[in-house]
Amino acid sequence: MAGQLITVSLTRCRQVSCDERWQITRSYTPSSSLLWVPELAPSPGLFNQFISRWKDQDPQMWWPIYKEQFVGELEQEEKKSALRRLWKKLKAGKSIALVCFCPDASICHRSLVAEFMRQYGIEAFEYEPPSQREEVDSPYVTTLF
């Protein structure tokens, strides 16, 4: 049975119970619980374009351009190789969290990687922390209390 792909921001990644956590960022945050996979991060050019031109702008203006460019980058051999590694682990039943710095998954490359993997039969979703009043039924979610 295939595993699950969970996307999550770095600030919440410890709340997710999974087999592996892949940090898909340009820069590395040293951690024994994260595997750094920069191949699934935006290229330096796209990342620098975001920082210099779009970071403080309305996402409606830049997200379509960013999305098109990043999806195009997923066709590069380096990224395809990392996507194949990810797919094989998921198909083998592993649950993997894709972690990055972005607080909003709706305008983040991790959601684009998840969307790409869905095309190949992978269940993917963004982690949503349970409220303090909700019961947690998922084996992939742990509570902090």
Image: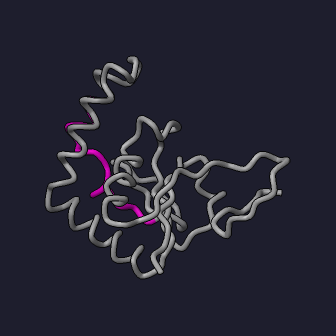
Mostly what secondary structure, the magenta segment?
Answer: helix
Residue at (27% x, 33% y) in the render: 66
Q: Quadrant of the C terminus?
A: bottom right
Magenta region includes residue 46:
yes
Coordinates of residue 84 in the picture (x, y in percent): 27, 70
> Residue 2 is drawn in which quadrant?
bottom left
Q: Is residue 106 above or below residue 137?
A: above
Front-lying residue, 144 or 7: 7
Residue at (39% x, 61% y) in the render: 36
Coordinates of residue 87 in the picture (x, y in percent): 34, 71
Magenta region includes residue 38:
yes
Which segment is the magenta one?
35-49
Q: Is residue 60 left or right of residue 75?
A: right
Q: Is residue 115 above or below residue 122?
A: above
Coordinates of residue 43 in the picture (x, y in percent): 23, 45
Q: Is residue 45 above or below residue 58?
A: below
Residue at (59% x, 46% y) in the render: 11
> Residue 114 is drawn in which quadrant?
bottom left
Q: Is residue 118 left or right of residue 99?
A: left
Coordinates of residue 62 in the picture (x, y in percent): 30, 24
Residue at (46% x, 63% y) in the render: 123
